[in-house]
Amino acid sequence: MTQTGWEFTITGCGTSHGNPPIGIPRLWSSDVRDRRRRAGGLLRGPGGAVVLIDAGPDLMDQLRDPYRDWDGTSYPERAVLRCDALILTHDHADHTHGFNDLRHLNRLMREPGKTAPAIPIYGHAGHLDQVQAMFPYCFGRGPEFYELSAPSLVATPVVDDQPITICGLTAIPFHTSHGSAGRTTGWRLGDLGYLTDLKALPVEAERHLQNLDLLVLDMLREETHETHLCWAEAMAIWQRLRPRRTVLTHMGHEVRWAAWQDRLPQGMEMAVDGWRTVITGASR
Ligand SMILES: [Zn+2]
Ligand SMILES: [Zn+2]
């Protein structure tokens, strides 16, 4: 059964350094649309389930103010107060170094008299091995582990090209290339394609990316880069896939919102932190 009730939010659309970069005045931008947290996403299901995509170093700020609209004068009702699953694209620091902050969600989800529910982390086995090596205290000790003030997480390996259901959301993981940095996992989530930290899209992956309602696409900058898509490479993928809508993410400081928005073709737009929409094609 098809439903349209999954809201998708880009909680961060910046490259690994975050931008604009501090301490280098010539690279600064005073445009708030160029102020980008590290890349991540948020899915909210019709029944209230929350699925996060990656957990970078800006995670706590993303949980506190996912839509970047909090004025700080009242408790942010739209804050992220739970996480029923986390989808991992890869193990790089800018996508994982917020893991410790998931402990607060363990705390908030704990019902009186019960232990805190563990949060499943869905990802490629090799990435999960790396994450567990970086954060061994977060994994494998059972849901009671939160009582020791550490997150309670469960590594949940996925198999490339094998569809799974996460909180009622149909999800397909597949192999993508991060260039010299190794592999990443691309995801189809309903009719959303999420391709971050991408240097080349394997032909075999394209079958998972047909008839997309929305494509979130890595686009670091105009010039080529060893591990990320540049503008020409991103355009080539876009022309092959022809999604209904496309939004660019993981952008470098060189990519100024005001200068780029007007040059994009119809159906493609710049992200800002807090950009959101409803995606189609998610099964109950
Ligand atoms: Zn990254
Ligand atoms: Zn990366």
Image: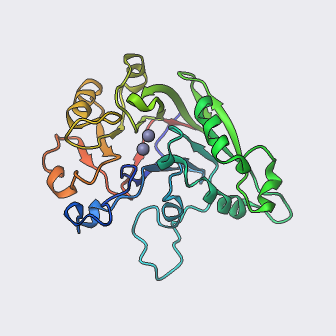
Q: Position of residue 85 (x, y in %)?
A: 62, 45
Looking at the image, residue 243 lies above or below residue 138: above
Q: Position of residue 48 (x, y in %)?
A: 59, 54
The one of 42 and 129 positioned closer to us in this rendering: 129
- What residue is at 36 percent from the left and 32 percent from the top? 212
Would residue 207 be found to the left or right of residue 157 on screen? left
- What residue is at 28 percent from the left and 36 percent from the top? 225
Would residue 147 be found to the left or right of residue 218 on screen? right
Q: Quadrant of ligand 1?
A: top left
Q: Position of residue 207 (x, y in %)?
A: 41, 19
Quadrant location, the N terminus: top right
Q: Quadrant of residue 228?
A: top left
- What residue is at 55 percent from the left and 33 percent from the top? 170
Residue that sits furthest to the bottom in the current view: 73
Looking at the image, residue 238 lies above or below residue 31: above
Q: Quadrant of residue 132?
A: top right
Residue 246 seen anywhere in this rendered image of the structure: yes
Residue 167 seen anywhere in this rendered image of the structure: no
Tally the marks: 0
Q: Position of residue 283 (x, y in %)?
A: 54, 35
